[in-house]
Amino acid sequence: EDKVVQSPLSLVVHEGDTVTLNCSYEVTNFRSLLWYKQEKKAPTFLFMLTSSGIEKKSGRLSSILDKKELFSILNITATQTGDSAVYLCAVPGSVTAGKLIFGQGTTLQVKP
Amino acid sequence: KAGVTQTPRYLIKTRGQQVTLSCSPISGHRSVSWYQQTPGQGLQFLFEYFSETQRNKGNFPGRFSGRQFSNSRSEMNVSTLELGDSALYLCASSLSQTNTGELFFGEGSRLTVL
């Protein structure tokens, strides 16, 4: 069965710290791995990683995909209070790509 | 370009009642999917619609149903509400059926069942 596991489930850091969020997955037909950020309501898209794009970077956020070991990490450097959110990792299901399998999420709190 | 719009944003129901939630996707998006989010279970897939056809359904009881209209707008219905149905219901749209996962989410409908 398709599965996504994130760790840690929650994390408290101070502004300026660097954090690493982990996501491991099991899916029969891998298409992509996605990271979303959810602050209040709607998850917003951060990155999509595929076989042809295993590393992505946007400002202080970066992500890599290890297809051999079946995991991805999301790095946030120089954290700010605005980075406080739930970070969700997801993969499209094996049977239908439209069904995203989400991990439990990592709740990040950045203290001033 | 308007985002995904969900209505109502908040609602309170009592056990046994039914509820209908609405979702208008981004213009041009033909695929709509629904997710239930609870603190304990996280985000769980409910259904996916493309061109008025349900393409996939999650592991939810038959009390949960949905449909999609010709203009791609979608509704989901929950009948005989239970306390455990209290959740944030998120709708997401994407351009195509065979997307590789980039979904655009609405802000959700927060359902409280008393």
Image (cartoon, coloured by chain):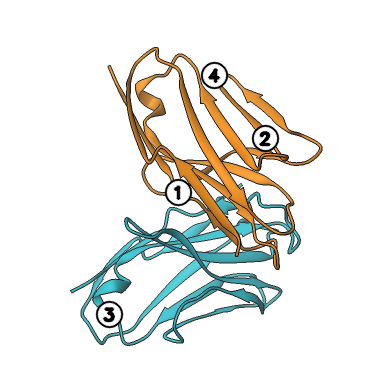
Which numbered disc flags the more N-terminal residue, 2 or 1? 1
Marks 4 and 1, how far apart at CA: 21 Å
Which colour represents chain B? cyan
Q: What residue type is labelled 4?
A: Arg
Chain in orange in the render: A
Q: Specify the label residue A42 is tagged with.
A: 1
Q: Which of marks 2 and 1 is in front?
A: 2
Q: Residue A79's x, y, as percent?
A: 42, 18
Asked whether the beta carbons under mark 3 and mark 2 sit within 8 Å of each other, the answer is no
Q: Dot 4 lies on which element?
A: loop
Can you say which quadrant of the picture contains the N terminus of chain A?
A: bottom right
Residue drawn at (30%, 82%) of the image: B81
Q: Name the residue under label 2.
A: A65
Q: Residue A63's x, y, as percent?
A: 61, 29
Marks 2 and 4, how far apart at CA: 17 Å
Rendered view: B91 above or below B2: below
Rendered view: B77 above or below B32: below
Q: Specify the label residue A60 is tagged with.
A: 4
Q: Specify the label residue B82 is tagged with.
A: 3
Q: In this view, does B94 lie to the left or right of A50?
A: left
